[in-house]
Image (cartoon, coloured by chain):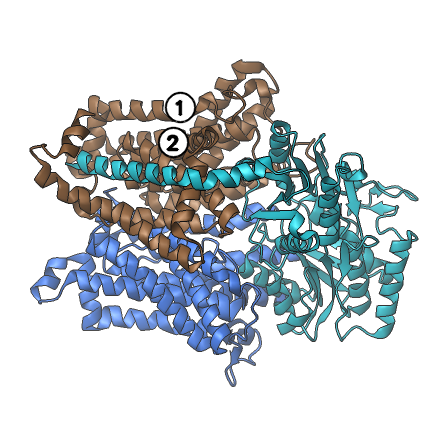
Chain colours: A brown, B blue, C cyan
Amino acid sequence: MSNIATFLRGSHPRLRTSLRPALITTLSAVIVPLCLFSVFLMMAGVAPLDAFRAMLQSSLGSSYGIGEVLVRAAPFALTALATAIPARAGLLNVGAEGQLVVGALGAAAASALLKDIGIVGLPVLILAGIIGGAAWAGLAAVLRTKLQLNETISTLLLNYVAYLLVAHILQGPLRDPASFNWPFSPPIPDGMRFPVLFDSRVHLGLLIAPVAAIIFALALWRTYWGLNLRVTGGNPQAARRAGIDVAKTYLTVMLIAGAMAGLAGVLQVVGVEGRLRPSTGVGFGYSGFLAAWMVSHHPLWLLGSSLLLAAIVVSGDALQITSGLPSSTVGILTALVLLGVLARGHSQGVRL
Amino acid sequence: MLPIIIAVLSGAIRSGTAVLFACLGEIIAERAGVVNLGTEGCMLIGALGAFAATAMTGNPFLGAFVGGLCGASLAAVHAYVAVIRRGNQLASGLAITILGLGVTSFFGRSFVATQINGMNSISIAGLSDLPILGPILFQHDALTYLAAFLAPGIWFVLYRTRWGLMLRATGERQDVVYSVGLSPTLIRCLAVICGGFLAGLGGAQLSVAYTLNWVENMTQGRGYVAVALVIFSSWSPLTAVAGSYLFGGALSLQLALQARGVGASPFLMSAIPYLVTLAVLVLVGRRRRQAMPDELRAVFERGG
Amino acid sequence: MRINSRLVVMAVMLIGSLMLAACGSPAAAPAGSKDAAAPASAVTTVGFLFVGPKDDFGYNQAAYLGSTGMEKELGSKVKVIRAENVPETEEAERVMESMIQQGAKVIFPTSYGHLDPALNVAKRHPEVTFIHQGGLKTSSNLGTYFGNIFEEVYLGGVTAGKMTKTNKLGFIASFPIPQVLENINAFELGAKSVNPNATTSVVFTANWCDPGKQAEAANNLIAQGVDVLTQHQDCTKTIVEAAERKGIMSVGYHADASSLAPKGWLTGSVWNWSPLYTQEVQAVLDGKWKEGPLAGKYRVGMKEGAVKLAPFGSSVPADVQALVKQKEQDIMSGKLAPFAGPIKDQSGAVKIAAGVNPTVDQLETTDYLVEGVVGSIPR
């Protein structure tokens, strides 16, 4: 905090050198997107300031709103980790979307098999979700390491396969007999779900996200494994020459990434949703991807960007309900912010 | 049986064309060393632009051109962020897609119920009446023919002209381009914008030639498939034709099987086009990789 | 340096938001307190959730038009707030909660998948009335309603059965959920009632609205020799237009699309929600909702005007029109019930015994296709 204080007082010795990029970043990532978005709002006949006010009120203006932001931010942060971890090793995982869905499927299937065994079932569900997500990511990793199929493309295509696979399984084996033949999985017994705080939807599972982020940060910067990862990400040829098993590194990071996305699926299914539906978690993977890129895959800062994106999503409801704007409007703001961040330029790329 | 085969094959061409346009556009961009995952967004905005312009002017050809321009303008944003500002290409592309989705649903609402006169299928004297081949190959709309002709055209430009040489050089060894006094940045931007134009045309084919309709998110992932098919086609416009029609064929076949009462899950069958694309990528993977433009390796093989 | 620039960004955003929130609260507070303090006779806020865009020429547009009709009817007594594209997940819960924060006292979640989230929110807010479209579960402050659109789909099938020359009808379906299967069955039963040779080939697109797939499904069915196409999709325009271009007939769904197909349009099933929505909200305003049938599983059909038959196309001859109109009368008078037993599934097994008229629960959990349907439900 003292850092900020000196910084703001202007007595910081490096002020002159640090202020310029900071200003550019602010301009590019905050002011310009907000101005462009205001233009959109005005085109729709909505006064931008009123809209922003309504958005803030609904997301950060009440304890309920803040709770909802947290409920949304945790899965975003986990899918962001699923993007950031492989990115540090030089892999592009665009498949958190599909990995989340398969992880959610794992948890829902485990719950259906276990029946109600109380709180001891919860770790099993979590594990099943991790395995589901990791398996789906592992598929892409094997394609990459054994068959040289680029993981960006394979994870992207596997997302579609994952949605359809889940839709198929929900139509058949995992269909809840008590749901009138609708494609929903059986509800997860309350005893096997994350404990909820007060009367809200904030549940203890949300803590998984910051814990995972901190563990990854420590592993990345304080362990030999993290060093390997960074070297591989910096230059795979050099890593190979240095005796690092690059294929193994790729496989591990993808498995971990899949596990993270799978956990996001667990948070949705075991946390807030209570069952799996065909549309559970759709879009969360891409939001996480954006959150990771907004902070250049920094394991701790991505918690902040996830909160920001979650706040945008939550406040989008208010935008729709009070101003009658289409729900897609929120997507425009999200995209503008990310483009603004990316347009800051190359100098602020991945720091290894 | 024969009518079904004809329906599937002509369906393969019709529903493969939008993907083919986008794929050709992406080949141009990637040959210059830039990946545009925003192809999906460019297609969407092209579909809406074409539909809106056709609704306003009554001319689907003008509409398709406007659609192309819309795709090009969205791609220009990508060019600015990814080429000039050097932001990460893949992230920028994804953001472009989200932006395209948002913008089109925002402005597309007023066009949902609009009726347009789209492109009719053009018969070619002598050829369209041929048995079997006629209905499969020669009863299509103008954009479908255009896509098929564009593929060899782009191949010619890429491999037989100085322009093409410079474009490929930009993607392979940009110092060569510097040495002849050209700017690789400029060439990349032009290539991306050009690719966006073609993706926009692909979207236009969907909206003003094929379905004559506009609905939110109507491309449903076809743009991503196009990007995947670029690798499948090893950056060659000619192979892209085969890849795109194969994708279209897989889509058409699963519907044809269902129409015949073949009992299989529509979900699993809907996954076939994606699985086929993956399988083919795996089968041809090793060899194809050799064809990858060098500058792309920096994007694809290092996360940064 | 990098950290600093991030700090500045975060600081700017934080300060900006605090400032906005600060100047926001006085402006918003009176609005909120007005709602809270308002006597029961004043404006009641009614919230609507739609699963898709409100102008899709289909399911959501029908519900949206119902909400505007109700708004017009009840005038200054209600204030309507809406949210579109609300997914059938827990996100619906958040949207409903925000509506309640905006003062909503009545909430219409209009998609089947909004049911579980609505039940959760209803438990937390006993003072709010929830009126769900299409569900089979209720609670003390959540009732459900639906329209028996299968009655109209049956009549569409009758028209198609009379008009077909090839005896092959095509049905482009979305997902194999009960409401869709019920309509496929009703269509085939209607067709078979006047034409024993009529079969219905069904294709599932596994999508609510992908025009490219719809067009391709239409082409493939037409190649099979199908000469009447109908559908259960959220956006309906592409298929009607595709049928017209190929010179075959079509039966519409959700909305009157006769203008799209001047030659081939036969008829179609159309929703008309505003009378029911008005009735529901009026009952809440009068404080009578909880006592009446509305708080349970309420079902309305063509008798109540909740579903309607779209105008006949010019190609439908007078005798066919008269036949269909007669059957319409019979359904309204209770003489004819589309799903009266015996109803057999594709394997020949009796699903509804002879002389039995199925209950709402039985119909709305349909998981089979009747004899005469070509195609299968994925399992």
Residue A328 picture location, percent across and down: 46, 51
Residue A78 numbered mark, or none? 2
| Residue at screen point 34% across, 67% down | B197
Q: Nearer the viewer, residue C83 or B156?
A: C83
User: Residue A173's image quarter?
Assistant: top right
Q: Nearer the viewer, residue A35 or B163?
A: A35
| Residue at screen point 38% across, 38% down | C21
Residue B146 picture location, percent across and down: 41, 74
Residue A212 picture location, percent across and down: 35, 24
Question: In the image, is B173 to the left or to the right of C236?
Answer: left
| Residue at screen point 72% across, 40% down | C284
| Residue at screen point 59% across, 35% down | C37
Amino acid type, mark 2:
Leu
Location of residue C53 with respect to B197 vertically, above or below = above
Q: Evaluate if marks 1 and 2 touch, with contact meaning CB atoms under 8 Å apart.
A: yes
Identify the residue position indicated by label 1 in the image.
Answer: A208
Whether residue B153 is visible, yes or no, is: yes
The C terminus of chain A, quarter of image: top left
Question: In the image, is B222 to the left or to the right of C315?
Answer: left
User: Residue A305's image quarter?
Assistant: top left
Q: How far is mark 1 from mark 2, CA to CA?
A: 8 Å
Tag 2 subunit: A
Q: Residue furthest bottom?
A: B125
Location of residue C228 with respect to A89 vertically, above or below = below
Amino acid type, mark 1:
Ile
